């Protein structure tokens, strides 16, 4: 019987074949998206709704989602925002004189 590691973020098992992210020289393991969630922040942070942007806000992970589902949602939002950023950076106005008129 093998010892299935547990994700340090969501506490769910990390199953064989799932992408993982090692921390602390491999002593701490997380699902890839759980590890990224710790770097990029919550869905509310990515959308500018958390207390970093809105004084007094308590917005964080979406209600009703597990920690792992919330991490997956945050990574999907980050990917969406990154694709928009790349599209803007590649636009003709962004290339023309540093985006200045």
Image: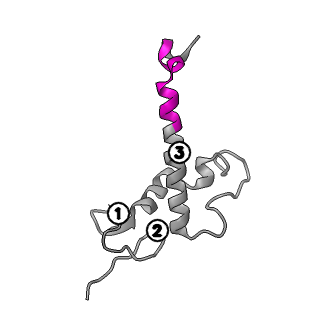
What's the magenta bit mostly, secondary-structure-wise?
helix
> Considering only vertical position in the picture, is 21 above or below 85?
below
Question: Residue visible at 59% across and 10% down?
Answer: 101
Mark pair 1, 2: CA separation: 14 Å
Q: Tell me which corner region of the image, top left, top right, bottom left or bottom right, holds residue 16.
A: bottom left
Q: Closer to the camera: disc 1 or disc 2?
A: 1
Q: Say whether marks 2 and 3 touch (CB < 8 Å).
A: no
Disc 2 from disc 3: Cα separation: 23 Å
Residue 22 figure quarter? bottom left
- Percent of width and height locating residue 63: 67, 66
34 over 95 or under it: above or below: below
* Residue at 66% from the left image edge and 51% from the top image edge: 50
Sequence-wise, the earlier of marks 1 and 3 is 1
- Magenta range is 84-96
Question: Where's residue 4, x and y in %?
Answer: 33, 80
Residue 92: % across, % down: 50, 18
> What secondary structure is found at the residue carrying circle 2?
loop
Please determine whether, in this image, residue 10 is positioned above or below residue 32.
below
The secondary structure type at the circle numbered 3 is: helix
Q: Residue 78, image x and y in percent? A: 51, 48
19 vs 43, left or right, is: left
User: Is residue 95 or residue 7 the one in the foreground?
Assistant: 95
In the picture of the structure, the residue carrying the numbered disc 3 is 80
Residue at the spot 56% in from the left edge and 14% down from the top edge: 100
* Residue 95 counted in the magenta span: yes
Dot 1 alpha-carbon crowd within 10 angstroms: few under 14, some 14 to 19, many 20 or more: few
Q: What residue lies at 25% left-to-right and 89% top-to-bottom? A: 1
Q: Which of marks 1 and 2 is nearer the N terminus?
A: 2
Residue 19, numbered circle: 1
Residue at mark 2: 9
- Relative to 101, is 85 above or below? below
């Amino acid at each position: 019987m093998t010892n299935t590691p547990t994700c340090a973020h969501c506490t769910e098992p990390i199953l064989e074949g799932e992408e993982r992210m090692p921390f602390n020289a491999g002593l701490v393991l997380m699902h890839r998206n759980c590890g990224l969630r710790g770097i990029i922040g919550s869905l509310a942070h990515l959308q500018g709704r958390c207390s970093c942007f809105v004084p007094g806000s308590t917005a964080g992970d979406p209600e009703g989602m597990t920690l792992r589902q919330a991490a997956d949602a945050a990574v999907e939002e980050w990917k969406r925002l990154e694709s928009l950023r790349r599209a803007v950076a590649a636009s003709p106005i962004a290339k023309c004189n540093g985006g200045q008129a």
